[in-house]
Image (cartoon, coloured by chain):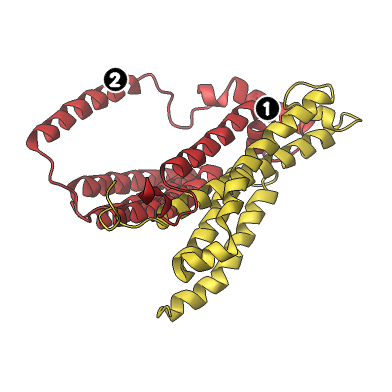
């Protein structure tokens, strides 16, 4: 049992707020500073804080490593996918205007939201994956030499 | 003293703090203290970015520099020893020579830089102004930074996402991704 009661209680309150702030930074990115990169980093930090306080096993249960593994590739695929969709709809690669049949701002908004979601997925997943890879290791002198 | 002068005063204050933290990081041998000080360095750098009105960069710097890199460096430090090996005098002198040359080059280039916040600097004229003028009519979102990142420079941002993905794959290949530290032992 973790003896740090204050840490556990405070972080239980803070972690949902960190996630909320991450999603705010993401979805408000068109109006205020923020966007996929910053939001993905904030969400990743939330998971890392959870792992630091409640242990790696609890974190692996909450966010399984295979989520991170799939998310890394999925985010990059979403971004490139938006590019290919706009290509097949008759525009240039990553020209979002064609995503809307009437060619208004709406196409740009759809495209920006979609690629930012790709950025968010990729960045969050990569940060969690790197943290899991580092934090799960033991000292090299404890393990068998090759 | 008006608002611009006060923020400029804060800029100098933050720069002096960064300088002293940098000096402390160089002098310390205890790696735990060094990791903590690099976290403090990032936090002050984030505050400095807010003072420079670069809130996007500040959010990322606070989360990456003060949060993630500190945690990752601590995790990496736990796998090695807690003290740095003392550096030989030769390496100190080599570093001094390289730094003096680089610093002299930077000071030589200083004269060509535009004045801080100058209206006729390249950043405030040319293509930057064009983005600001065209974003309301072409993309119609208030945050020009997002418009440039996601739409005008979408191709660059896609490259950045691929770089992030490549970094993740690289770490996954070097350390194993399941994070159990077991798979690497049997080969």
Q: Chain of mark 1?
A: B
Q: Is residue A96 above or below residue A25?
A: above
Q: Secondary structure at mark 1?
A: helix
- Snapshot quadrant of residue A6: bottom left
The color chain A is rendered in: yellow
- Residue B102 is situated, as x and y percent measured from the top left of the image, at 26, 25
Picture coordinates of residue A131 (x, y %)?
46, 53
Q: Residue at x 38, y 55 (%)?
A: A137
Specify the quadrant that holds the C terminus of chain B.
top left
Number of residues whose C-alpha sits closer than 10 Å to that of mark 1, classed few (under 14), some (14–19) or many (20 or more): some
Q: Earlier in the sequence, mark 1 or mark 2?
A: 2
Discs 1 and 2 share one subunit: yes
Q: Is residue A83 above or below residue B77?
A: above
- In this rendered view, identify the residue nearer to me: A132 or B33: A132
| Residue at the right extreme, as displayed | A102
**Cα distance in 3D space between marks 1 and 2:** 35 Å
> Quick check: can you spot residue A13?
yes
Give the residue at mark 2.
Answer: B108
Q: Residue at x 55, y 73 (%)?
A: A12
Q: Chain of mark 2?
A: B
Question: Any idea which chain is the red one in this picture?
Answer: B
Q: Nearer the viewer, residue A71 or B30?
A: A71
In the image, A82 versus B1, the foreground residue is: A82
User: Which residue is disc 1 drawn over?
Assistant: B152
Q: Residue at x 49, y 53 (%)?
A: B178
């Amino acid at each position: 049992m973790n003896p740090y009661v204050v840490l556990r209680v405070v972080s239980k309150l803070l972690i949902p707020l960190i996630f909320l702030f991450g999603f705010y930074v993401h979805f408000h990115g068109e109006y205020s500073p923020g966007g996929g990169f910053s939001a993905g980093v904030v969400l990743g930090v939330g998971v890392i804080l959870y792992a630091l306080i409640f242990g790696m096993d609890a974190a692996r249960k909450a966010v399984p490593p295979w989520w991170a593994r799939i998310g890394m590739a999925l985010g990059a695929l979403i971004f490139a996918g938006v590019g290919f969709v706009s290509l097949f709809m008759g525009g240039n690669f990553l020209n979002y205007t064609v995503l809307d049949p009437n060619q208004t701002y709406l196409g740009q908004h759809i495209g920006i939201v979609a690629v930012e979601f790709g950025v968010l997925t990729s960045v969050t997943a990569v940060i969690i994956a790197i943290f899991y890879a580092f934090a799960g290791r033991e000292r090299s002198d404890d393990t068998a030499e090759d | 003293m008006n608002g611009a002068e006060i923020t400029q005063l804060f800029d100098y204050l933050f720069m002096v703090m960064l300088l002293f933290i940098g000096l402390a990081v160089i002098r310390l041998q205890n790696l735990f203290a060094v990791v903590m000080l690099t976290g403090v360095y990032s936090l002050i750098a984030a505050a400095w970015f807010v003072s420079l009105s670069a809130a996007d960069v500040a959010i990322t710097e606070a989360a990456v520099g003060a949060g993630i890199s500190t945690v990752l460096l601590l995790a990496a430090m736990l796998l090695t020893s807690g003290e740095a090996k003392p550096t030989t005098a030769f390496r100190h002198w080599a570093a001094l020579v390289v730094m003096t040359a680089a610093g002299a080059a930077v000071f030589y280039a200083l004269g060509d830089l535009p004045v801080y916040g100058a209206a006729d600097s390249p950043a405030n004229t040319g293509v930057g102004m064009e983005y600001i003028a065209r974003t309301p009519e072409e993309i119609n979102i208030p945050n020009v930074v997002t418009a440039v990142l996601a739409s005008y420079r979408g191709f660059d941002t896609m490259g950045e996402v691929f770089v992030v993905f490549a970094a993740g794959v690289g770490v996954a290949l070097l350390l194993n991704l399941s994070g159990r530290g077991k798979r690497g032992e049997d080969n």
